[in-house]
Image (cartoon, rainbow, N blue to C red):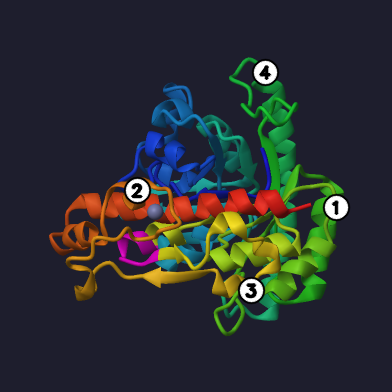
Amino acid sequence: MRFPVYFPDATRAVIRSLDSQDLQKVGIEGIILNPYHLASQPGINVIKKLQGIKEYMSWKGFAITDSGGWQLLSLVYKNPKFGKINDQGVVFYKDSLGKNKKYVFTPEKSIQNQLDIGADIIICLDDCPGKNASKKEIITSVNRTILWAKRCKTEYLKQLQKRTETRPLYDPYDSRKRPLLLAVVQGGSNKKLRARCAKALAEIGFDAYGWGGWTANAKGGLNIDIGKFIVSQLPKDKPKFALGVGYPWDIIEGVKAGYHIFDCVIPTREARHKRLYVWEKDPNKINPLKTNSRKLFRYFYPDKGKYASDKKPVDKYCDCLLCQDYSRAYLHHLFKIKDSLSWRLATIHNLRVYAKLIEILRKNVK
Ligand SMILES: [Zn+2]
């Protein structure tokens, strides 16, 4: 795997309105998937039976599975009707489609599921506390995250022994023919707790580490101070993953802070909501690490009336399908009539902006 790298969220084994070939043409090298959602539909057994997620989706790139720590927060912590959490693991009372069905996610089960799905990087189950969690709740989250990481590592080693016959990890850049195991650092905005979590995880030993929990500060921007601090507490030679980060300018700041891997729903979701990123300058002529990251992009809103007969491309610096072959006027029309092609072309464009950003970051990162 080459760094930095950005992975769009194919939570349910699809980036809405795009197929795997579209992603490859855009220059996307990997996707991130979610075992909780996949367990609900189509079911982990179905994916296993069909030789793993890459075969299932006809996907030739990298795949990461996120253990589901974020789902603990977004579903169970917000609404106890969704399930319960204790040191043993998580029990969900509903599937991701809202049907009453019980799912038990222990650290062990989480590792087995992720290996069955067949990703290149799998993530230890972690306990992600709420945005306004008390110090006591953050301490519980850190203790549980460390405990679960230990159990995940033990199960991972056990499963590797058992599964030597299964399809090995595909990674032309990595000689280790096994999925990599990543652990997530929790601790909220408390540096002492972040340091304790990072140190304990590094002692257990993982292939990569993640910045977990809320990455935003009180103003909604990236909390880069905590992000940098976490990097300083982790082994220097291991890749760092900024989970859920972020806007294009956040990715630039994340790279400066020492992160290598990024994933985010932002470009695909924003594309469907008619917010497209446009380069302010020719990306081939800039070093994003030495430019004000906030000034590299502006938003383009295709539904504005002034674009109804605008012949120009959305972005004169972009080489995507939308910008090369179609006008602002045509995209405006597609959104007006709510045709699904509007989603496809807008998503292709936003993902191309991210892929191009990664390309120029790689040229400039030492
Ligand atoms: Zn474009």
| Residue bearing mark 2 | 324
Q: Say whether disc 1 or disc 3 marks the residue closer to the N-terminus.
A: 1
Figure disc tally: 4
Q: Nearer the viewer, mark 1 or mark 2?
A: 2
- What x and y, as percent, mark residue 138? 68, 72
- Please determine whether, in this image, residue 57 is positioned above or below residue 198: above
Mark 1 Cα shell of 10 Å, populated few (<14), some (14-19), many (≥20): some
Q: Is residue 177 visible?
A: yes
Q: Residue at x 40, y 32 (%)?
A: 57
Alpha-carbon span between mark 1 and mark 4: 28 Å
| Residue bearing mark 3 | 292
Kind of residue at disc 3: Asn
Do the residues under discs 1 and 3 have CB atoms within 8 angstroms? no
Q: Point out which mark residue 235 bears.
A: 1
| Residue bearing mark 4 | 164
- What x and y, as percent, mark residue 330? 20, 57
Alpha-carbon span between mark 1 and mark 3: 29 Å
> Is the CB of the residue bearing disc 2 within 8 angstroms of ligand 1?
yes
Q: Say whether disc 4 or disc 3 marks the residue closer to the N-terminus.
A: 4
Q: Say whether disc 2 or disc 3 marks the residue closer to the N-terminus.
A: 3
